[in-house]
Image (cartoon, rainbow, N blue to C red):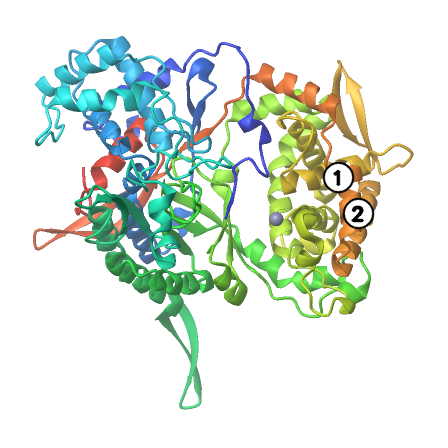
Amino acid sequence: MKTKLGHYSEEAWSSRSRSLIFALVSGAMLLAQSPAQTPNPPAARPDRVGELERLGEGGRDLMIVGVEAPGFDKLKASQRKYAYFLYRAAIAGNDIAYFQNHRSAFEIKDLLEQIYLHSEGIDAATMEGLEEYLKFVWAHHGQYGHDSHLKFVPRLLTFKQLEKAAKQALKNGAEFNLRRDTLAKRLARLRPQIFDAKVEPVQVNQVAGVDVVATSSNGLYDPGLTSKEIQALSPELQGKLNVRFQLKKDKKGRKAAEAEEFKIGGAYGDQLELVNYWLEKALGYVDNEQIEVIKDGVKKTRFEPIANQRKALVDLITYFQTGDEKSFKDHSVAWLKTKSTVDYLNGFYEVYKDPRAVVGSYEANVSFRSDSDKIEKLSQNALYFEAKMPWPDLWKRAKVEPPVASVVNVILETGDSGPMSPAAYNLPNYSDIRKEFGSKNVVLLNIESAQSAKVKEQVIQAFYLPEDQELITKFGDLARQWTVYMHEVIGHGSGQPDAKLNGQDPAKAIGGVYSALEECRADCVALYQFFDPKVVEIGAVSEADQMAAAKAMYLGYLGGQLRMNGLVQGDTIREAHYRGRQLVLNYLTQPGTDFGVALVQKDGHSFVQVTDVQKARTGVGDILVKLQTFKSNGDKEGVEKFFADFGTKVNKDWQADAKGRMDALNLPRARAFVFPQLVPVVDQKNDRDVLRDVTLETKETFTEQMLRFSRWAKSREIAPK
Ligand SMILES: [Zn+2]
């Protein structure tokens, strides 16, 4: 499961804005066009971090953001090498996402890239239109929106221009790999796929009452297949995570579906073979852990490879070799138990791209733990915080199992998780594994905090009172981070059911509204416990700054929710986290009470004002006691009424006000990332390159990054061009 980017942070990202013309960042476009083959000397290239470019009408469709991964140089050399081989494995699998998204997506990308790389003599207007469309194709892995699942077409490029450009590129030496095709045939075939929004308009169609297989245009089902052929397969094949379905016809012309496994020698076999090639190299650098052994009565320490990490990788390699999902489940168990410095994802996880919600999309990443001291200390103190919860002792746990929670910086994400990234994930998805072994909670710190300095400043100026702006600028990021940490680490796992429930799961007793209750409860734990002296002791904030940061936490949390009303369509809030926040905002500002929080009007707009943060905490404590009482008693009616009163309805005034203000700011609808680049340092040994070390840079443009992925995806060289 994924936490959507913007969930905890800048909700305004997904806003739909109207027509304020924002000139395309022409400087960035020019930089992006410098050929990738002749890199400038490193010293001459600027660092590219923060907002790099804007794309689409008025620059509102996509913002490209460069991210850093601070701390990579502090890793051990062996960890840096391990990360590098995992990085190569992630790049090797990236193209799978194109094939999964649509049968023509890879071909479209390849055609456009070849023209881009052989563009001498093609006019500037054509190249501008082609490059913009190519960037969208890279960001979304094809011609369908990553989240919307709807087809998009070029904004500034016509078929005539593309045709002329392709012919010129062919003369210039473009490698179109035509084989039995001609260029004319290929262009004719791709024309409706690229330019006609009405041809195969929906990638994932889950509308009730339609044949979801027949009406969805992703690459997991051959065209012509319908649900009927899928339902004719064995239940095992119908429920398999790593298959796609081919259309077969018998002699009488009857249709049938044939499952093709994702494995070496099967579907995406070429890519998976290279993924394994690099995973096997990574195996040589599995991290070591310190083991205490007693030998002849003397205590000694020695270092051993982390057993779970090694096992996880071996199982993953076996899985890609055989396609046997059992190996992936074994891998998942070992992976979730691994608390290593460098971690990864690689495989088929989320099912959002399959209209039946069964088949997994390829994604991969490499990350390393960051700031983990503090989150680990928080986790070790889970029992301490449990004792200090405001609800009665009989609903407190005597034992708390600290969850596997890590805060990481990602070095790279590919496939379904990059260059468009989630903010956090909680995996594996297998419910039997989650029940028996738990899951791993991972917060992507550098992605979560990556934003455009300009957009951030605009939001602060538009949505906070002048007297609070400095406080939010100073403590806003820290406060948001700790809201997330405390929510995940000491929030969800806290409390216990009343004995009279006899072991029945409160979730079952409470039903649909349970997830809103649970998200709200976890948020309130953070808002309540941030005041504790232990928070200073574990290093979250200094004693002198604690109350200021707490005030920033309330302002950011409540102000963010005020803004959120402007993003909701209609008059009901459905998403669990947002229902919880609406409840807190409404509860603390309800007429006839004083929780030190007020909504004030200034220049015709609403703002949250926190006059007394201790009083606000008392109010949150009240909410927390109520929520825990409902949960412990499995009190369905109680929760439903509480949320109906405070956490369901959109506030129409806030909605109109927030929407107007966000529209005026011209905020981008989506973000795609340029990740840091790992640069291999090699030694020559017997005419072969040997990896000596790895450094990290943030120099690439989006175009350079995506072209490099395409080149490196096919390479077995340690240091490819
Ligand atoms: Zn949660």
Residue 183, given in percent of the width and then of the height, sits at 13, 22
Q: Is mark 1 within 8 Å of ligand 1?
A: no
Looking at the picture, tell me which residue is in the foreground, 652 or 91: 652
Q: Is residue 76 visible?
A: yes
In the displayed structure, would residue 270 be above or below residue 216?
Answer: below
Residue 412 appearing in the image: no
Q: Secondary structure at mark 1?
A: helix
Neighbor class of circle 1 (other Cα within 10 Å; few <14, some 14-19, many 20+) is: many
**Dot 2 alpha-carbon crowd within 10 angstroms: few under 14, some 14 to 19, many 20 or more:** many
Kindly identify which numbered label has been placed on residue 280: none
User: Residue at the front extreme?
Assistant: 252
Mark 2 residue type: Ile
Q: Is residue 488 left or right of residue 520?
A: left
Quarter the C terminus occupies:
top left
> Which amino acid lies under the numbered mark 1 shown in the image of this protein?
Leu
Residue, disc 2: 623
From the viewer's side, name the closer residue of 361 and 230: 230
Provide the residue designation for mark 1.
Answer: 583
Residue 540 vertical placement versus 648 (above, below): below
Which residue: 75% across, 39% down?
Answer: 583
Task: Identify whether 594 is placed above or below 27.
Answer: below
Q: For residue 316, what is the image quadrant?
A: bottom left
Along the horizontal axis of the image, is 441 left or right of 26?
Answer: right
